Amino acid sequence: MGEEEYRECVDDTFESFRTYDQYVDVVSCWEHFLTEQYGTNDTFHFDRFPAYFPEDSDDPLEPSFSVLFNEDYGIVFDVNQELPSVETKFESKLTELERYDQGVEFHTGNGGKASPSQYDIALLIHGDNFQTEKLRLKKAFDDGKLNVDSNLVLLSYKYIDQDTNPKYQFQRASMVGDNFGDDPLPEQVRMSTRMSMEGGTFENIDIPADVFYDRKATGVLFNSEPPSLYLACYIWHTVFYDFLDDDQRIVWQRRDPNKTLDIVVDVDDLTERLNSDYIPDGGVHEDWVDNTLEYMCVAETAEKVSEGEYYVKFRNLRDKRREYNDTLSDRSEHSDLAHLFAEWHCENTVEMGSGELQELVKADTSNGPDKPRDDLTQPELGEF
């Protein structure tokens, strides 16, 4: 196995995990901030998983999140690490922003829809890439490649990892795009005033990391398919324990990382439970869950029994995760588990040929527990 190729695989896989996790943070920040500011209004509705169906297309528009403040005002948010570097894909992104401008119907809290007379489009870019993307967007405006009637508000976001008060910081670009058109909101809470010189200052919005944690704990996902590693860590950390019988939980509490606790899961059932019990309105798709369980097969923490059914080799990995707790500064509670899974997955991805990898994800009815159920509390031999 090539050490360099293996390490690159782990780094790239974890970077995808980290980026998605930060997207979830950003949505949770804004849900906290806007709900605290405006949530007392009966018409206010924060939508973490919006999907709009324009009349000119069968393909839904799925912005990162949206908020309806009242019958007169709303905002569509689009979160990005950076904009596409390939010119054709960049132009497709501009077209997507223009499609947000074509009469979006916002979801209301009671299951209905509303078309506010004014809504803005807020485009968020990671702070590391903000200056470059500002220039690209300004050129797109100047060249006539980007035309929207709604206000297009350009914002940066970045995580500031301070020891005493880690936070996310959001800043509006003052020279590119527009300010918020939030005149329908009470003057004392308008973001257009706070984030411009109209209020006598040009404030950033700072959201401490600890205040939005509850929002993230129930929101969990960003409005797009998560990396399989991300969903695998969430399910392993949060969901699989609830599948255990009482005697399995007793064994789990012993914290033996070599003791396998047999779980057989059905993709349809697991998807339904995620959407009903763990991630309300999350819109988790069955293929997301299937892809995640196949990822776990390559990491050899699961085996495929049949189409839609998997055997999970569940274990208490807390002691194995400790080695990463001391080296990681990333704020995700699943980061240590993500590194562990990424290493197992990449070890096989790099070392095995395509045929061997296909065998790992191949459905086989002989897969599954190889010990009688009543052997559960007996010591097992060997390492995982």
Image (cartoon, rainbow, N blue to C red):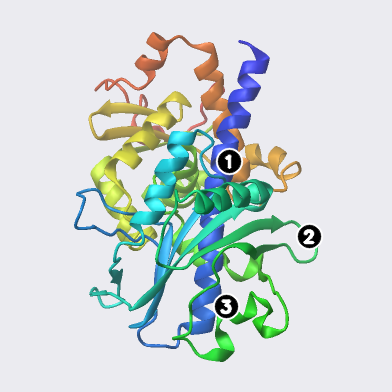
Q: Is residue 356 above or below residue 202?
A: above
- Identify the residue position indicated by label 3 in the image: 192
In percent of the image, x 56 and y 20: which residue is there? 347
- Identify the residue position indicated by label 2 in the image: 162
Residue farthest front in this picture: 143
| Front in this rendered view, residue 264 or 115 | 115
Q: Considering the numbered disc 3 on the image, is that residue within a helix, a strand or a loop?
A: helix
User: Residue 291: percent from the left, percent from the top?
Assistant: 36, 34
Q: Residues within 10 Å of mark 1 (few under 14, many from 20)?
A: many
| Front in this rendered view, residue 14 or 56 | 56
Number of numbered callouts drawn: 3
Q: Considering the numbered disc 1 on the image, is that residue within a helix, a strand or a loop?
A: helix
The numbered dot on residue 30 is none
Please say if the residues under marks 3 and 2 sit with CB atoms less than 8 Å apart.
no
Q: Label 1 sits on what residue type?
A: Leu
Residue 323 can be seen in this image: yes
Number of the front mark, 1 or 2? 2
- Whole-number angstrom distance, CA of label 1 to CA of label 2: 23 Å
User: Residue 277: percent from the left, percent from the top?
Assistant: 34, 61
Q: Label 2 sits on what residue type?
A: Gln
Residue 377 can be seen in this image: no
User: Residue 108: percent from the left, percent from the top?
Assistant: 30, 75
Tell me which corner region of the image, top left, top right, bottom left or bottom right, holds residue 276: bottom left
Does residue 279 appear left or right of residue 153 in this picture?
A: left
Please say if the residues under marks 3 and 1 sit with CB atoms less than 8 Å apart.
no
The numbered dot on residue 337 is 1
Q: Considering the numbered disc 2 on the image, is that residue within a helix, a strand or a loop?
A: loop
